[in-house]
Image: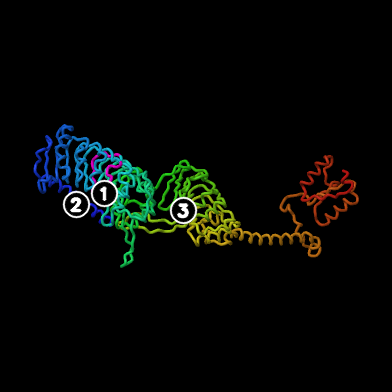
């Protein structure tokens, strides 16, 4: 549809141009005029009754005196001022339009190409109410002042290419009740830096089959203004094709912002939608076309993403259009063709409140603010982040690979975060309030990522649940209170952490299982105790966490051993207590044994007693023991005479197997 419209418009341009060429050619084939200015060539077109209807004056760029030439033109034009319909003056050194030209009130075509005009005169063309076409190309005109074309309601074509026009009066083209038949305006190769919404006003006089063509190519336009305070309304459609190629336009939305219309107005007023009756398919047409391709300064940032996203829906018409839009900035995207890019590449840098050593960007394609702080030596989460541009936005935070980050603490912005990546840090503590914020994380609707792919649009949107990447840290356990937080709507990755699978953490089994039902949590493995190292938490049970098989076996062995030992001790104690009875009854005395068996000893026993106890106790005991066949060392009989008593006692103890002391009152006194 757009290509067809552009073809129709350019055919109209060719037809009008051919008309100009026809007029010029007709005059070129006319008869030379005898009053032609010196050093110039004049050709006249005489149709009937010797009436001059067309005149062409061409000085061929010769060095003609401007004042003399102006006087000669006045003499030439005065007689024909009522009858002349077509006038062409070109290639002269004139810097001003002669007043005699302004008196040609019945002109249909006026061609002023290739001169040196600095300015078009006031109150000159306003009298040419029948004028159909005006061309003043290849001059030095610097401005178009207000009132220049007032009242020219018959004017159909205006050509002002290759001048030095830097400003256009606010009222030149902005009166919707004036210039009602003007269908072609050509302002290419001038020096305009800004543009008012007068092209839209001119389009009010166009139609779907006959659009107004406005070309302002190869200027310096970078700004769009609305100093005329035009208010857009859908009650009256504008049909025009505006070509502003080869300018310095940064964004399409510079036009929208400068001219004060919204995307909804663009879709509702500048485009026409209808359903075909045959198959109920949506058909659209651009009523008002912008062509800002081949811009010398197009910025591939976030400002045009909404417009590009909308254009994706109409790829069949606009695919070739975007092939002619090339990025100039940022430098990382320079010379990239927009149609070959992903929408996610269109971002705007954000410096306000962006943490040090981080990069913050606005990514409108999925309404997110991305904060890249990976490996930024963070020791704690930032306290503040760049504000979200709209309520529909959320954060995507990358705090991964910060080896000084040990605590995941609560931050207010976590509740507005759709993706949080704190993987491969050194986190060993997770604040319960931070986990509660995870539960409030919003899901995101992601739009189409790519404009075009092999001539076809990839415009599939998809919803992604919020994600929190905590893998590769040092988390051993979480607070039991986390079981009261509903995290089933969040994708948590908790693998590659040294989980402590102890009995007091047995609740983690059911908790991890509940998370795994709704989202991927990673292969969560035990790190301690050593008997469970490498075991999946989800595949374990409470017995695994609470019962140690080695300890249980050791307990059984120890309990059995202790029972036997206790029995033996009790038996030994009983035998010890009953040793006298057992000896008397069965002559069994297990404790009576000779510890000195095999040793060469002189006596079996040394009987030690006081000399005062010798008679009768000492002798009686000695006799009783010897009667049993034991050898007794007794001091009265066996001590060496004359030796010290202590030395005799020591030798007797050493030479006897046992020592028996008869302790009495006399013994203690000694």
In-front residue for pair 187/514: 187
Please report the residue visible at 44 percent of the width from the left and 57 percent of the height from the top: 464
Q: Residues within 10 Å of mark 2 (few under 14, many from 20)?
A: few
Judge whether 63 appears above or below 223 on screen: above
Q: CA distance from mark 2 to mark 1?
A: 20 Å
**SS at badge 1:** loop
The quadrant in which the C terminus is found is top right
| Dominant secondary structure, magenta | loop
**SS at badge 3:** loop
The residue indicated by pointer 2 is 15
Q: How many marks?
A: 3
Task: Name the mark nearer the viewer: 2 or 1.
Answer: 1
Residue located farthest toward the bottom when viewing the structure as drawn: 278
Q: Is residue 337 visible?
A: no
Task: Indicate left or right for 99 with 326 as reference.
Answer: left
The residue indicated by pointer 1 is 153
Task: Indicate left or right for 589 with 442 as reference.
Answer: right
Q: Residues within 10 Å of mark 1 (few under 14, many from 20)?
A: some
Mark before the other along the chain sequence, 3 or 1 = 1
**Magenta region: which residues?**
146-166
Please report the residue visible at 49 percent of the width from the left and 49 percent of the height from the top: 422
Q: Is residue 552 visible?
A: yes
Q: CA distance from mark 2 to mark 3?
A: 51 Å
The residue indicated by pointer 3 is 392
Task: Name the mark nearer the viewer: 2 or 3.
Answer: 2
Colour scheme in the image?
A: rainbow
Q: Position of residue 633 (x, y in %)?
A: 81, 49
Mark 2 touches mark 3? (CB < 8 Å): no
Q: CA distance from mark 3 to mark 1?
A: 50 Å
Q: Position of residue 86 (x, y in %)?
A: 17, 45
């Amino acid at each position: 549809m757009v290509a067809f419209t552009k073809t129709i418009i350019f055919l109209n341009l060719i037809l009008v141009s051919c008309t100009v060429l026809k007029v010029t050619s007709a005059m070129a084939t006319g008869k030379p005029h005898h009053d032609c200015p010196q050093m110039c060539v004049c050709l006249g077109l005489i149709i009937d009754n010797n009436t001059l209807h067309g005149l062409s004056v061409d000085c061929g760029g010769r060095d003609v005196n401007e004042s003399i030439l102006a006087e000669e033109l006045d003499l030439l034009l005065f007689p024909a001022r009522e009858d002349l319909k077509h006038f062409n003056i070109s290639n002269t050194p004139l810097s001003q339009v002669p007043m005699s030209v302004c008196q040609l009130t019945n002109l249909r075509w006026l061609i002023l190409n290739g001169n040196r005009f600095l300015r078009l005169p006031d109150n000159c063309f306003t009298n040419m109410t029948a004028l159909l076409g005006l061309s003043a190309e290849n001059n030095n005109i610097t401005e178009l002042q207000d009132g220049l074309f007032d009242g020219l309601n018959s004017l159909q074509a205006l050509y002002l290419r290759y001048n030095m026009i830097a400003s256009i009066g606010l009222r030149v083209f902005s009166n919707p009740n004036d210039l009602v038949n003007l269908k072609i305006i050509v302002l290419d190769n001038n020096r305009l830096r800004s543009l008012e919404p007068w092209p839209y006003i001119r389009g009010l006089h166009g139609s779907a089959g006959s659009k107004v063509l406005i070309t302002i190519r190869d200027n310096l336009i970078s700004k769009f203004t609305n100093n005329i305070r035009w208010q857009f309304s859908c009650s009256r459609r504008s049909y025009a094709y505006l070509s502003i190629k080869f300018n310095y336009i940064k964004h399409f939305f510079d036009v929208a912002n400068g001219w004060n219309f919204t995307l909804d107005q663009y879709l509702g007023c500048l485009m026409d939608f209808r359903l075909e009756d045959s198959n109920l398919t949506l058909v659209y047409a651009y009523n008002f076309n912008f062509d800002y391709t081949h811009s010398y300064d197009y910025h591939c940032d976030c400002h045009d993403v909404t417009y590009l996203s909308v254009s994706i829906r109409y790829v069949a018409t606009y695919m070739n259009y975007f092939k002619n839009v090339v990025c100039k900035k940022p430098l990382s995207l320079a010379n990239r063709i927009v149609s070959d890019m992903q929408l996610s590449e269109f971002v705007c840098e954000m410096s306000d409140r962006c943490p040090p050593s981080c990069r913050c960007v606005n990514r409108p394609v999925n309404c997110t603010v991305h904060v890249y702080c990976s490996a930024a030596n963070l020791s704690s989460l930032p306290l503040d982040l760049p504000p979200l541009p709209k309520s529909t936005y959320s954060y995507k935070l990358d705090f991964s690979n910060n080896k000084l980050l040990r605590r995941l603490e609560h931050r207010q912005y976590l509740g507005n975060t759709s993706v949080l990546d704190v993987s491969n840090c050194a986190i060993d503590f997770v604040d319960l309030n931070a986990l509660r914020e995870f539960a409030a994380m919003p899901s995101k609707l992601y739009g189409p990522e790519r404009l075009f792919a092999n001539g076809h649009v990839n415009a599939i949107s998809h919803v992604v649940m919020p994600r929190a990447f905590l893998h590769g840290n040092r988390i051993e356990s979480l607070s039991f209170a986390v079981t009261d937080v509903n995290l089933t709507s969040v994708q948590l990755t908790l693998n590659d952490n040294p989980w402590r699978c102890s009995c007091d953490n047995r609740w983690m089994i059911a908790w991890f299982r509940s998370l795994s039902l709704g989202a991927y949590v990673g292969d969560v493995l035990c790190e301690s105790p050593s008997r469970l190292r490498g075991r999946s938490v989800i595949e374990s049970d409470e017995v695994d966490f609470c019962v140690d098989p080695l300890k249980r076996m050791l307990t059984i062995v120890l309990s059995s051993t202790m029972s036997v030992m206790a029995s033996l001790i009790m038996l030994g104690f009983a035998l010890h207590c009953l040793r006298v009875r057992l000896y008397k009854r069965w002559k069994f005395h297990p404790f009576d044994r000779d510890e000195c068996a095999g040793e060469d000893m002189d006596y079996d026993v040394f009987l030690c007693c006081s000399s005062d106890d010798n008679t009768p106790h000492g002798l009686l005991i000695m006799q009783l023991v010897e009667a049993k066949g034991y050898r007794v060392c007794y001091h009265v009989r066996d001590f060496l005479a004359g030796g010290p008593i202590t030395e005799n006692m020591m030798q007797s103890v050493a030479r006897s197997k046992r020592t028996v002391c008869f302790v009495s009152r006399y013994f203690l006194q000694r």
